[in-house]
């Protein structure tokens, strides 16, 4: 029986890269690291990941070059389930039950709002939550608001399986003044907010639809964006190897 880990790359701010990072890291862990992966797309009605798989399958059907690339790699696509967050979360819980014990890691793409019936019940079903942030005031403010809800209501509560959350920089711009990054990092350290030691770069390749794939492993153009390091941290954390090291809540 597998020790399934449920993880969400989640925040309360739109457009910070939740779905994009979910797709890319799920594909890295499945196709490059050979973990048994599943995705639950619970971001209704947008369902970016569920629809992306659908579009990709259609494209493969119509495009012999892509079809050949896919067949040549002999990959087995990870399942993508669709589920709606609701007051009782019956449908969501039944998918989680199906996957628990026979999957290594389940990625859940969640709606970016705290004001949704049932959403806190779903947070309680996660083992780890990764919160992407960008260096702008709005993104940081909403991340801090979200984190305080996780701290006050979810983490270490008896009805919750959430073991920890981690903040992760996304859309990092090297050329930009480093001051804001340093200030935010000092603030997180002071408040004992766990921040992953990796910055995923802002790269045009992330915006290209053809490079975000649920059927193929990481595209070469994205190798240097540090998304591979992010996936490695996820792998470490779910195997409980580095949790103690990067959890700056510990003395
Ligand atoms: N590291 C990155 N570099 C450049 N663009 C990025 C990066 N990460 C995400 N993006 C882009 O930012 C946009 C928003 O990403 P995405 O849809 O994944 O965000 P989201 O948080 O899931 O949004 P929503 O709240 O609408 O669900 C997309 O165009 C995506 O390609
Ligand atoms: Mg999204």
Image: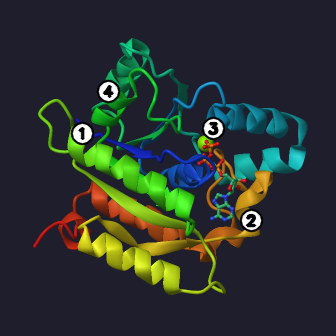
**Marks 3 and 1 in Cβ contact (< 8 Å):** no
Residue drawn at x 69%, y 53% as measured from the top left: 212
- N-terminal of the two: label 3 or label 1? 3
- N-terminal of the two: label 2 or label 3? 3
Query: Where residue 193 sits in the image (x, y, percent)?
Result: 29, 64
Q: Which residue is mark 1?
A: 154
Task: Relative to 206, say whether 14 is above or below.
Answer: above
Q: CA distance from mark 2 to mark 1?
A: 35 Å
Query: Where residue 173 sits in the image (x, y, percent)?
Result: 63, 78
Q: CA distance from mark 3 to mark 1?
A: 26 Å
- Camera-nearest residue between 170 and 39: 170
Does ligand 2 reach within 8 Å of label 3's beta carbon?
A: yes
Q: Which residue is mark 3?
A: 49
- N-terminal of the two: label 2 or label 4? 4
**Marks 2 and 4 in Cβ contact (< 8 Å):** no
Q: Which residue is mark 4?
A: 121
Query: Where residue 232 sits in the image (x, y, percent)?
Result: 41, 66
């Amino acid at each position: 029986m597998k020790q399934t880990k449920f993880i969400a790359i989640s925040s309360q701010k739109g457009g910070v890269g939740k779905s994009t990072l979910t797709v890319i890291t799920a594909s890295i862990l499945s196709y490059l690291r050979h973990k048994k992966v599943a995705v639950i797309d619970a971001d209704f009605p947008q369902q970016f990941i569920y629809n992306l798989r659908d579009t990709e399958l259609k494209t493969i059907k119509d495009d012999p070059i892509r079809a050949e690339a896919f067949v040549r790699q002999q990959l087995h696509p990870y399942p993508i389930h669709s589920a709606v967050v609701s007051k009782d979360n019956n449908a969501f819980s039944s998918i989680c039950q199906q996957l628990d014990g026979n999957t290594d890691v389940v990625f859940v793409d969640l709606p970016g709002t705290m004001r949704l019936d049932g959403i806190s019940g779903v947070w309680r079903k996660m083992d780890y939550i990764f919160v992407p942030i960008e260096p702008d005031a709005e993104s940081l403010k909403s991340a801090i608001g979200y984190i305080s809800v996780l701290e006050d209501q979810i983490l270490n509560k008896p009805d919750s399986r959430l073991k920890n959350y981690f903040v992760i920089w996304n859309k990092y711009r090297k050329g930009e003044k480093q001051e804001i990054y340093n200030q935010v990092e000092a603030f997180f350290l002071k408040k004992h907010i766990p921040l992953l030691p990796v910055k995923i770069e802002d790269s045009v390749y992330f915006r290209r639809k053809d490079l975000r794939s649920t059927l193929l492993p990481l595209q070469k153009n994205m190798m240097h964006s540090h998304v591979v390091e992010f996936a490695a941290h996820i792998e470490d954390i779910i195997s409980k190897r580095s949790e103690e090291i990067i959890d700056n809540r510990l003395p």
